[in-house]
Amino acid sequence: MPKTGKMEVDETRCKGCYLCVSVCPKKCIERSDKFSKTGYYPAKYKGSDCIACLSCVKICPDLAIKIYEI
């Protein structure tokens, strides 16, 4: 059975580089349409399809992403 996961983005840390969007094999991360408190459009999880591969966690320069395997 394939792994499934849930992604969380710390909006106060994310600076909107979207490297995570570019490496996600399932394309389940997108740009938020709302500003964060720090003035960026953070990345956000679309809400499904995460396979807990951790590609986004490994590439995030701001350590703003956490993945929970479910």
Image (cartoon, helix red, strand yellow):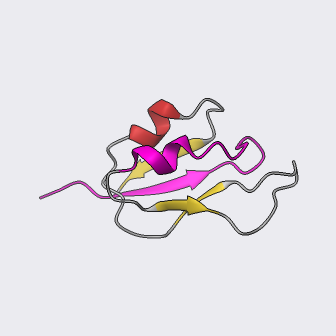
Residue 34 lies, in percent from the top left, at 77, 67
Q: How many marks?
A: 0
The image position of residue 45, as x and y in percent, is 53, 62
Determine the image quadrant of residue 65: top right
- Check the image and report above or below for 70 versus 23: below
> Toward the viewer: 54 or 21?
21
Quadrant housing the N terminus:
bottom left
Q: Residue at x 74, y 40 (%)?
A: 13
Q: Is residue 40 left or right of residue 56?
A: right
Q: Position of residue 37 (x, y in %)?
A: 88, 54
In the displayed orientation, state which residue is furthest to the left.
1
Residue 66 position, x and y percent, is 53, 44
Q: Which residue is located at x 53 percent, y 41 percent?
A: 19
Query: With respect to residue 45, does 55 lie above or below?
Result: above
What span is in magenta?
Answer: 1-24
Residue 42 is covered by the magenta coloring: no
The C terminus is located in which quarter? bottom left
Q: Who is closer to the viewer here, 23 or 45?
A: 23
Q: Residue at x 43, y 62 (%)?
A: 28
Is 35 placed left or right of 32 in the picture?
right
Choose top left, top right, bottom left or bottom right for residue 51. bottom left
Q: Residue at x 46, y 42 (%)?
A: 56
Q: Is residue 11 shown left or right of residue 64?
A: right
